[in-house]
Image: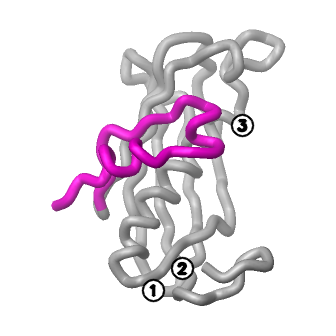
């Protein structure tokens, strides 16, 4: 199975770059990323902001789903993200691991777990994505 992590890390941009998310494994079966916690990731109490957990779950699930979709000439966009916060974390490295629940032609569902350096679960989530055929309209532009 092809690992696209090096290729994707070479063209990171936007949110992934701003947050410092890097991928170590990206295949049709699994997407793994890591983020070193910095002050930008914390809320006023000094713990990682819930939006960071939601964001890395969304990024990992979307990236895994995109690899599946690209093989079919499609792209994907998120429809919903349900994230649960389990354990607060203040420092270290977060690891997000996303795996597919279903990889349909119209929608995909991926689930993810965020862990800290000790392997303790910090957050879990599930993302549902819409698969778009080439040439579809998305926010006023063709995909």
Viewer-nearest residue: 8 or 107: 8
SS for tag 3?
helix
Mark pair 2, 1: CA separation: 6 Å
Taking the view exactly as shown, the residue that stands out farthest to the front is 10
Mark pair 1, 3: CA separation: 29 Å
Query: Residue at point 40% right, 74% down?
Result: 70
Q: Are marks 2 and 1 in contact (CB under 8 Å)?
A: yes
Tell me if residue 84 comes above or below residue 108 in the rendering. above
Circle 3 residue: 51
The span picked out in magenta is 1-27
Residue 115, given in percent of the width and then of the height, sits at 45, 29
Residue 53, given in percent of the width and then of the height, sits at 62, 36
SS for tag 1?
loop
Viewer-nearest residue: 57 or 136: 136
Taking the view exactly as shown, the residue that stands out farthest to the left is 1
SS for tag 2?
strand
Choose top left, top right, bottom left or bottom right for residue 13: top right
* Residue 32 as seen in the image, left or right of residue 92: left
Mark pair 3, 2: CA separation: 24 Å
Looking at the image, is mark 2 or mark 1 earlier in the sequence?
Answer: 1
Mark 2 packing: few (<14 Cα in 10 Å), some, or many (20+)? many
Circle 1 residue: 105
Q: Quadrant of the N terminus?
A: bottom left
Query: Residue at point 58% right, 67% down?
Result: 128
Mark linked to residue 131: 2
* Residue 84 as seen in the image, left or right of residue 104: right
Residue 27, given in percent of the width and then of the height, sits at 29, 57
Q: Is residue 92 magenta?
A: no
Residue 63, given in percent of the width and then of the height, sits at 46, 57
Looking at the image, is mark 3 or mark 2 earlier in the sequence?
Answer: 3
Tell me if residue 58 comes above or below residue 103 in the rendering. above
């Amino acid at each position: 199975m092809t690992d696209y992590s090096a290729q994707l890390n070479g063209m990171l941009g936007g949110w992934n770059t701003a947050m410092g998310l890097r991928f170590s494994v990206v295949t049709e079966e699994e997407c793994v990323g890591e983020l070193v916690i910095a002050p930008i990731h914390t809320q006023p109490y000094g713990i990682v902001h819930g939006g960071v957990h939601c964001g890395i779950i969304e990024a990992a699930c979307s990236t895994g789903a995109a690899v599946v979709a690209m093989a079919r000439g499609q792209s994907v966009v998120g429809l919903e993200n349900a994230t649960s916060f389990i354990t607060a974390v203040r420092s270290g490295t977060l690891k997000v691991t996303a795996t597919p629940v279903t990889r349909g032609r119209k929608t995909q569902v991926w689930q993810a777990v965020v862990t800290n350096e000790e392997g303790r679960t910090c957050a879990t989530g599930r993302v549902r994505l819409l698969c778009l055929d080439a040439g579809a309209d998305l926010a006023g532009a063709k995909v």
